[in-house]
Image (cartoon, rainbow, N blue to C red):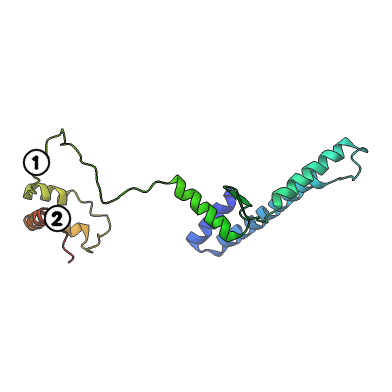
Amino acid sequence: MNRQDRARKKARRTGKEQHLSKYKRLRNVTSKRIRSAHYKYLQEKVGGIVQDPSSSPQSYCNVKRAWSYLKLLRTDSTGIPTLLSGDKVCTSDNTKAEALRKHFDSVFTSEKLDVFPHLPASPYSDIPEIKFTVPGIQKQLEAIRPDKACGPDLVPARILKEAASELAPVFTNFFQQSFDSGEIPSA
């Protein structure tokens, strides 16, 4: 299966017919092997079943294994079973839903969101005022990797790096105003 996956990726990447035909050949071989293994598994589980368990203990084990396999294949869903809510038996979907709702309401707590606890004063000192500097912004602009993609503003990283000394004063004012006001300009 790993060889098949590698061949599929290579066929998609290259688009060559020879890689595609190799992938298809490996896909078919893998499918045949999976079917063969499944058939062998079924023969182990179901094969040689005898109805009379007294005739052969081995065949009785085969019957048990066959039923365990068939139970595994069952996909029917019974839904939510009958529920007992207090002294009431809930059989319909509506009564089951109502019983579950009542149970969840009793288990979960609701907190008042309009009242917040009062926090004591912080034992830590306030951080100093943040100031953006031209050398700091210029250093950050010069550290940009020019091989990376553009940001949402579609300005190439190479231009930001090469024009760092000219852009740094403008960006410094821009960043400081944005930080002080707590707003990011929309355009």
Assign a secondary structure to mark 2: loop
| Classed neighbour count for the residue bearing mark 1: other residues with Cα under 10 Å, few (<14), some (14–19), many (≥20) | few
Classify residue 116 as left or right of residue 49: left
Give the residue at mark 2.
Answer: 182
What mark, if any, has residue 68 been given in the picture? Answer: none
Given the current orientation, which residue lies at the most extreme front position? 87
Give whichever of 153, 88 is nearer the camera: 88
In percent of width and height, residue 63 lies at 82, 43
Tell me the quarter of the picture where residue 53 sits: top right
Classify residue 138 as left or right of residue 47: left
Give whichever of 155, 184 is nearer the camera: 184
What mark, if any, has residue 128 been given in the picture? Answer: 1
Q: CA distance from mark 2 to mark 1?
A: 16 Å
In percent of width and height, residue 160 lies at 16, 57
Query: Is residue 33 in view from this perspective?
Result: no
Q: How many marks?
A: 2
Q: Label 1 amino acid?
A: Pro
Q: Label 2 amino acid?
A: Gly
Query: Is residue 185 in view from this perspective?
Result: yes
